[in-house]
Amino acid sequence: LIIPEKESREAVLFATTVNGQEKTIKTKFMVLLILICCLYLIFYIENILTAQIVYGVGDTSRYIQSITEYKGCLYGITVAQFMTVIFSLKLMVYVIIAMLMIAVCYRMGSGAKIVTFIGIFGAAEFIMHRYIPESSLLSPFKYINIISFLKIDKLLGKYVNINFAGYPVNSSYLVIISMVIVCVGLYVFFIKQWKVSCIAWNKKVHKKHIFDGIYRRNMSVSYTHLRAHET
């Protein structure tokens, strides 16, 4: 959706329009959002159907604590309600990842830089999630983390305290609030404010084009070059 447009320099052309790239970004984000929702819904339904056929889901009206893996869950909800909550939260996580990808792709100059940044960012997230102790003062970085977001069902299935500035905080509440803040923040500060940055970019691009035009106007060219223009 984004990289070919940047590598072909079409992004510069879009930036010189009246609305900059604001409408383009919103359109691409909506396409990506619809695609993510459709794919996730298909995979989620497929997993449920496979589990029903192979293992049997059982009575979804029973409490989630009746399942051994989630017996430490603090919320008095049924299996069906728990599955609905997890579906909604994981969908939000994939939307956050999509918004991060769009932000990185638009801010970085080339495909190589994009891949490098995503690799470094992903490695840093994995290291923090894997190696930071739960009782450490750095534990918020362990749980306010993309990998922890993807494992939101594990966090909701047990009680885990986070050492937040020396105070114990329920990890489930902190992670969910962080997800909402990140999602809203990415939309407001990147997609909504992109038009402002495009206006500044327009001035920069226009100055560069004017300078190039003046410079090229005073350059001597060959007869072959002129004939090529005529052709």
Image: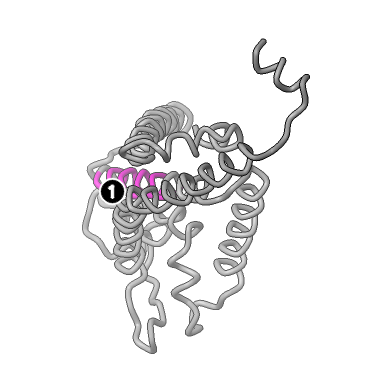
Q: Is 42 left or right of 225, judged from the image as shown?
A: left
- Residue 131 image point, x, y percent: 61, 72
Q: Is 116 left or right of 203, judged from the image as shown?
A: right
Query: 10 Å neighbourhood of mark 1: few (<14), some, or many (≥20)?
Result: some
- Residue picked out by circle 1: 85
Residue located at (42% from left, 40% from top): 15
Residue located at (32% from left, 53% from top): 193
Say what secondary structure mark 1 lies in.
helix
| Kind of residue indicated by mark 1 | Val
Picture layout, residue 42 above or below residue 103: above
Q: Nearer the viewer, residue 223 or 1?
A: 223
- Residue 194 image point, x, y percent: 36, 50
- Residue 63 image point, x, y percent: 26, 52
Q: Is 220 left or right of 76, judged from the image as shown?
A: right
Instruction: Judge whether residue 94 is colored magenta.
Output: yes
Picture layout, residue 9 above or below residue 135: above
Residue located at (40% from left, 53% from top): 200
Instruction: Judge whether residue 120 is colored magenta.
Output: no
What secondary structure is the stretch in magenta mostly built from?
helix
Q: Report if residue 56 is visible in the image.
A: no
Colouring convention used in this rendered image of the protein: one colour
**In this view, which residue lies farthest toward the top?**
231
Residue located at (78% from left, 19% from top): 224
Q: Nearer the viewer, residue 170 or 66?
A: 170
- Residue 12 image point, x, y percent: 50, 39
User: Which segment did they paint magenta?
Assistant: 81-97
Picture layout, residue 84 above or below residue 34: below
Q: Nearer the viewer, residue 61 or 229?
A: 229
